[in-house]
Amino acid sequence: MNLAQYLPVLLFILVGLAVGALCLGMGAFLKPHKPDPAKNSPYECGFEAFEDARMKFDVRYYLVAILFILFDLEIAFLFPWAVALREVGLTGFVAVLIFLAILVVGFVYEWKKGALDWE
């Protein structure tokens, strides 16, 4: 194993760490030190918090968020396919139709199960 091959990578990591440490150090050194009761309060919005920060969230919020990410990512797969449609030909077109059919079946299943209903 030749360590000279890894010298650029090690140098890149060291420079990155040095720049990060320099920025943090300069920020800690140059920041204004003027604490007052308003800045030290939990919220600067004008009123005290009315609930605990560790309150329970409805699990449907997370379910809808995950489903949004899942069905939103299908668009990310459709853009490269649309750009290369002429090169992939009929086989690529059929493959994407199968992909979309599977996603539609999943979407209909989630819709029927009521995962998208917000009461």
Image (cartoon, rainbow, N blue to C red):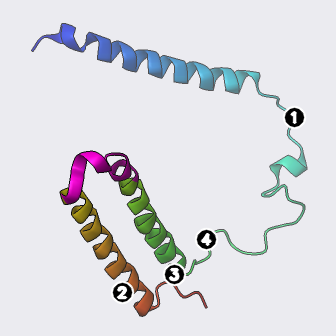
**Which residue occupies the foreground of this view, 91 or 44?**
91
Measured in 3D between alpha carbons, the distance from the residue under mark 2 to the one under mark 3, in whole angstroms, is: 16 Å
Give residue 24's position: percent from left, percent from top: 61, 26
* Neighbours of disc 3 within 10 Å: few (<14), some (14-19), many (20+): some
The answer to whether residue 74 is above or below residue 13 is below
Residue drawn 36% across the image and 77% down it: 104
Mark 4: amino acid: Arg
The answer to whether residue 33 is above or below residue 98 is above
Mark 3: amino acid: Arg
Give residue 48's position: percent from left, percent from top: 84, 67
Q: Say whether disc 1 or disc 4 marks the residue closer to the N-terminus.
A: 1
Residue designated by label 1: 34
The answer to whether residue 62 is above or below residue 1 is below
Mark 1: amino acid: Lys
**Which residue occupies the foreground of this view, 68 or 50?**
68
Tell me the quarter of the image containing the N terminus. Answer: top left
* Neighbours of disc 2 within 10 Å: few (<14), some (14-19), many (20+): few
**Which residue occupies the foreground of this view, 1 or 52?**
1
Residue drawn 33% across the image and 52% down it: 81
Measured in 3D between alpha carbons, the distance from the residue under mark 2 to the one under mark 1, in whole angstroms, is: 56 Å
Q: Say whether disc 2 or disc 3 marks the residue closer to the N-terminus.
A: 3
Residue drawn 50% across the image and 83% down it: 116
Name the magenta segment's main secondary structure: helix
The answer to whether residue 100 is above or below residue 80 is below
